[in-house]
Amino acid sequence: MAPNNCTLQHKLHNKIGLFYILFSVCAIAGISLSNFVNPAWIWLHYLTKPTATALLVPWVLLSRTPVSIRYRNAIAFGLALAVVGDICLMLPQDYFLAGLFCFLLTHCAYIYALCCDNISLSAIRNKKLSSEFILLRAIFIITAVFVIFEGIAALILIRLWEYLPNSMKIPVSVYAAILAFMAGLAVNRAIVYPFKNPIPATPYDVTQHIAKNTTSNSAAFGGIFFVISDSLLAYGRFYVETPLSPLLVLGTYYIAQWCFASSVQRRDQ
């Protein structure tokens, strides 16, 4: 790609990122003003809530140095599905189940992305300790992380179970399990990566190592914030909603999506 084209692409990429932040703030401001000042402010929320997420699709696709093409495309596809989910959840009509399904597909797309460069246990290496010990420790960590996230999902479901309509119990349970699996996979990917690739000796390789690990950490935070956001959303819808619920749900949601979008771009460039 020509230098001028790269410069233009980089500038456009940065501008879209700034617009994402602006529209995210406007979406949160719109719902807050609608709740506390005047319901007429809901128009600002309707305009900017899905638009903010939609902006991340070209932002991801314009990444000059993605960690991989498949990873980039899967994250972009998940974000596109999330836009439809945003629209379903914000409309006055009850399209909650449709929105839930869209975000279920979003998490499936993220799971596929996280598995694109899956860390094989057989590839784990460490010269300082025996490979058997490292393998066992990695298996223990992976298992523990998945148990923790699935346990959190189970505890939330138990707390909400009596408040869930019968028609929503199975869909919400399936969604919670997939969400927990996605978050566990994202966190495991970040934790186990250093075991697979110990810090190399040469400075250039060290830079590559840190860059790749940073993108893994970004996706891990995205998974964690998604769990927080969806847990707050579920409590607000089925249990009790506080005036700050929309602010907390949207704030953590936009951070989660930003983290996943940011995980596409390598940090060594």
Image (spheres, helix red, strand yellow):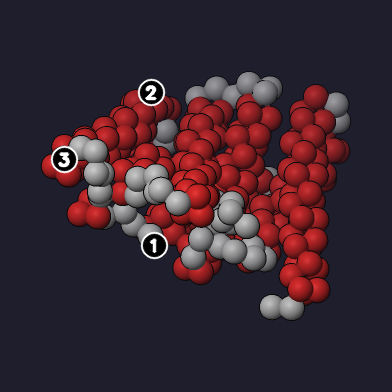
User: Which residue is located at x 76 percent, y 55 percent?
Assistant: 14
Where's the N terminus, which quadrant? bottom right
Q: Position of residue 245 (x, y in %)?
A: 63, 27
**Which residue is identified by label 1?**
116
Mark 1 falls on what kind of element? helix
User: Which residue is located at x 85 percent, y 26 percent?
Assistant: 37
Q: Earlier in the sequence, mark 3 or mark 2?
A: 3
**Is 129 placed above or below 7 here?**
above
Mark 2 falls on what kind of element? helix
Q: What numbered label is drawn on residue 159?
A: 2
The answer to whether the residues at label 2 and label 1 have Cβ atoms under 8 Å apart is: no
**Is 204 placed above or below 42 here?**
below
Front residue of 218/230: it is 218
**Which residue is identified by label 3?**
130
User: In the picture provided, is 94 more to the left or to the right than 239?
Assistant: right
Distance between mark 2 and mark 1 Cα atoms:
35 Å
Give the mark toward the camera: 3 or 1.
3
